[in-house]
């Protein structure tokens, strides 16, 4: 009918008014009912996931004027492991990863950046690995490469295509959209290099990134060259 068509047209036009929620960072159209419902659902889940109430025993591995980095290990108390998992799920949703896809969850170390507002605004998951690829050029796969080889080749990298001995694999790195470009990812990685192996500092070459996104590549390229 005529009035139904009109409704649709109005809704379509109003979609142009996109706004960004200053708390959860979601970009949505305030005029769209569907968007509002989606935002309300995401908003609360996001705030619950990133809320950091403080723990009796926190493994603080770095402190800054605008926050601190806490390390969570697989055998830590349930509430700590749970928080690490909640934040990982947020990051995975944004990255489009399948949930529970850590290669070895019992070995993973999770680094959480908590800001002065008691929110977890950064998360890095590091795992022990034996080999990685550095990033500079992305070589074409050779003909005799198996599918598995090909996948492996394209999944793990950091800065050449020659496999390198790496010690620490970064399987996830995520910073809250409204807290980016403030050096949080850089500080998370610096802290991993200093604390991943007790008493020793890893070089940038001993670190490899897996499944990098465009953002991840830009960041890693910058981080590896500096
Ligand atoms: N575009 C261009 N350069 C960038 C970008 C970008 N999006 N992000 C970082 N850089 C470079 C810049 O040179 C930057 O320095 P500058 O701000 O002085 O110019 C430098 O890297 C350091 O950046 P940080 O501030 O330390 O990085 P940030 O805290 O913003 O986090 C991250 C970077 C983690 C990639 C963030 O953008 C993010 O969470 N993105 C969405 C999730 C994602 O894609 N994560 C990577 C997945 S790959 C993986 O998990 C293995
Ligand atoms: Zn919101």
Image (cartoon, rainbow, N blue to C red):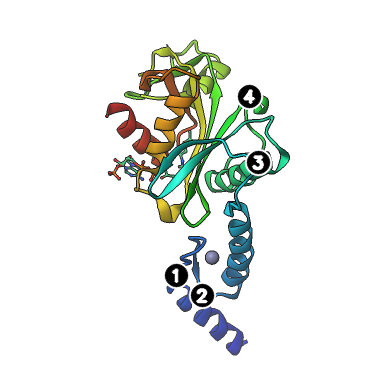
Q: According to the image, label 1 marks what residue?
A: 19
Q: Could you tell which of marks 2 and 3 lies nearer the N-terminus?
A: 2
Q: Residue at x 57, y 30 (%)?
A: 109
Category of crowding for the residue at label 1, using alpha-carbon neighbours closer than 10 angstroms: few (below 14), some (14–19), many (at least 20): some
Q: Could you tell which of marks 4 and 1 lies nearer the N-terminus?
A: 1
Q: Residue at x 44, y 53 (%)?
A: 177
Category of crowding for the residue at label 4, using alpha-carbon neighbours closer than 10 angstroms: few (below 14), some (14–19), many (at least 20): some
Q: For marks 4 and 1, give the one nearer the viewer.
A: 4
Q: Quadrant of the C terminus?
A: top left
| Element on which disc 1 rests | strand
Q: Could you tell which of marks 4 and 2 lies nearer the N-terminus?
A: 2
Category of crowding for the residue at label 3, using alpha-carbon neighbours closer than 10 angstroms: few (below 14), some (14–19), many (at least 20): many
User: Where in the figure is residue 188, as x and y percent of width and height?
Assistant: 44, 36
Q: According to the image, label 2 marks what residue?
A: 30
Q: According to the image, label 3 marks what residue?
A: 80
Q: Nearer the viewer, residue 21 or 65?
A: 65
């Amino acid at each position: 009918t005529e009035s139904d068509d009109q409704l649709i047209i109005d809704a379509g036009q109003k979609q142009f008014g996109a706004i960004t929620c200053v708390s959860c960072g979601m970009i949505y159209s305030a005029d769209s009912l569907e968007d509002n419902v989606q935002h309300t659902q995401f908003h609360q889940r996001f705030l619950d996931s990133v809320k950091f109430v403080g723990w009796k025993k926190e493994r603080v591995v770095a402190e800054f004027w605008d926050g601190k980095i806490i390390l969570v290990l697989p055998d830590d108390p349930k509430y700590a492991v749970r928080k690490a998992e909640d934040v990982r799920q947020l990051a995975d949703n944004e990255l489009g990863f399948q949930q529970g896809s850590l290669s070895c969850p019992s070995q993973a170390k999770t680094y959480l950046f908590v800001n002065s507002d008691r929110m977890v605004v950064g998360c890095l998951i590091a795992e022990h690995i034996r080999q990685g690829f550095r990033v500079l050029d992305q070589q074409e796969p050779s003909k005799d490469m198996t599918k598995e080889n090909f996948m492996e080749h394209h999944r793990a990298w950091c800065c050449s295509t020659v496999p390198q001995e790496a010690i620490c694999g970064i399987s996830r790195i995520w910073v809250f959209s409204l807290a980016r470009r403030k050096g949080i990812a850089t500080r998370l990685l610096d802290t991993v290099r200093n604390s991943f192996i007790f008493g020793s500092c890893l070089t940038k070459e001993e670190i490899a990134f897996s499944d990098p996104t465009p953002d991840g590549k830009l960041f890693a390229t910058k981080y590896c060259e500096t």
